Amino acid sequence: MPKVAVEQSLSHISKMLRENGYDVVQLGNWQQTVDAVVITGQDLNVLGDESKTITGAPVISAEGLSANEVFHEVNKRLAPTEHR
């Protein structure tokens, strides 16, 4: 099951991801390896460049996106096959 770190203020997105089979952890819980990170986009440097390099996980900004659009982005980035 893919693990996604989500900013605390994005609880509606966390709920949608959980309901669709993702393991969701709160952003900042870096004791765990995650497959993707969802942020509000208000502070794009919330992770710092070093953390992005260490995790290697795609960072998805939820700014201006609906929960469905964020869910689609997570699926697209974590899908085993390439999307067009």
Image (cartoon, helix red, strand yellow):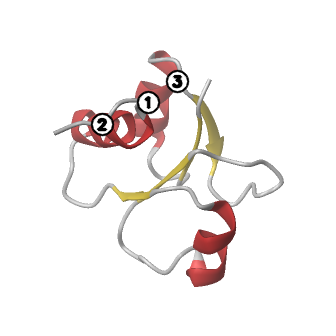
Q: Secondary structure at mark 3?
A: helix
Tell me the distance, in whole angstroms, between the alpha carbons under discs 3 and 1.
19 Å
At horizontal 52% and vertical 18% (from top left) the residue drawn is 21
User: In the displayed structure, does residue 70 sit left or right of residue 74?
Assistant: left
Tell me the distance, in whole angstroms, between the alpha carbons under discs 2 and 1.
7 Å
Lower position in the chain sequence, tag 3 or tag 1:
3
Residue count near mark 2 (Cα–Cα under 10 Å), binned few <14, some 14–19, many ≥20? few
User: In the displayed structure, does residue 57 sit left or right of residue 68?
Assistant: right
Q: Which residue is mark 3?
A: 18
Residue count near mark 3 (Cα–Cα under 10 Å), binned few <14, some 14–19, many ≥20? some
Tell me the distance, in whole angstroms, between the alpha carbons under discs 2 and 3.
23 Å
Lower position in the chain sequence, tag 2 or tag 3:
3
Q: Position of residue 73 (x, y in %)?
A: 30, 43
At horizontal 36% and vertical 73% (from top left) the residue drawn is 42
Q: Secondary structure at mark 2?
A: loop
Query: What amino acid is labelled 3 in the image?
Result: Arg
Which image quadrant: the N terminus?
A: top right
Q: Which residue is mark 2?
A: 82
At horizontal 43% and vertical 30% (from top left) the residue drawn is 80
Q: Quadrant of residue 84?
A: top left
Q: Quadrant of residue 22?
A: top right
Give whichever of 49, 27 is nearer the camera.
49
Q: Position of residue 29 (x, y in %)?
A: 75, 54
Q: Which residue is mark 1?
A: 80
Q: Position of residue 19 (x, y in %)?
A: 47, 17
